[in-house]
Amino acid sequence: MAVYGYVRVSTKQQSEDGLSLEAQQRQVEGYAMMQGMQIDEIYVERAVSGWKPFDSRPQGRRLAGCLIAGDVIICSKLDRLFRSARDALVVSDELKKQGVSLHLIDLGGDVTGNGVSKVFFTIV
């Protein structure tokens, strides 16, 4: 099992400033520690719009390509990973089929783990 973090900012200025990326990384690392997990790698997406489908972003594609059953992805907020409801539902369904857990901190944790989180994730 590997644990991956994913952080993203939309603009070049946010990317250069780095504060948002650092804050997201701290949240991901803190959440992992509270869950008894150790982060293997954090994928950092700089100046890439969330409207771009996850697997067409450079780091999103790289992350998606290395996942195996039992892996975990942690992201601080839903909007850091997705801006499109369709992309969110397609990717989360694919992750679940692969046996990969997706933890969104702002939604309370694992959104692929059980029916309740899936319903909540779909509504949000």
Image (cartoon, rainbow, N blue to C red):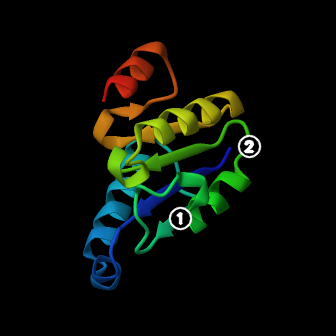
Q: Quadrant of residue 118?
A: top left
Q: Quadrant of residue 103?
A: top left
* Left or right: where 16 falls relative to 54: left
| Residue that numbered label 1 is attached to | 43
Name the residue: 66% across, 62% down.
Answer: 62
**Is 108 situated above or below 78?**
above
Name the residue: 67% across, 36% down.
Answer: 70
Residue nearest the observer in this picture, 58 or 18: 58
Name the residue: 53% across, 64% down.
Answer: 43
Amino acid type of disc 1?
Tyr
Secondary structure of the residue carrying tag 1 is strand
The mark total stands at 2
Secondary structure of the residue carrying tag 2 is loop
Residue nearest the observer in this picture, 93 or 5: 93
Name the residue: 57% across, 43% down.
Answer: 72
| Residue that numbered label 2 is attached to | 68
* Left or right: where 103 falls relative to 23: right
CA gap between label 1 and label 2 equals 16 Å
Give the farthest residue toward the bottom: 16
Where's the N terminus, which quadrant? top right
Q: How far from the left and from the top, in percent, is residue 88?
A: 47, 39
Q: Is residue 77 visible?
A: no
Where's the C terminus, which quadrant? top left
Q: How far from the left and from the top, in percent, is residue 80?
A: 37, 54
**Is 121 situated above or below 106?**
above
Give the farthest residue toward the top: 115
Q: How far from the left and from the top, in percent, is residue 57?
A: 56, 63
Instruction: Report the disc number at residue 63.
Output: none
Classed neighbour count for the residue bearing mark 2: other residues with Cα under 10 Å, few (<14), some (14–19), many (≥20)? some
Amino acid type of disc 2?
Ile
Q: Earlier in the sequence, mark 1 or mark 2?
A: 1
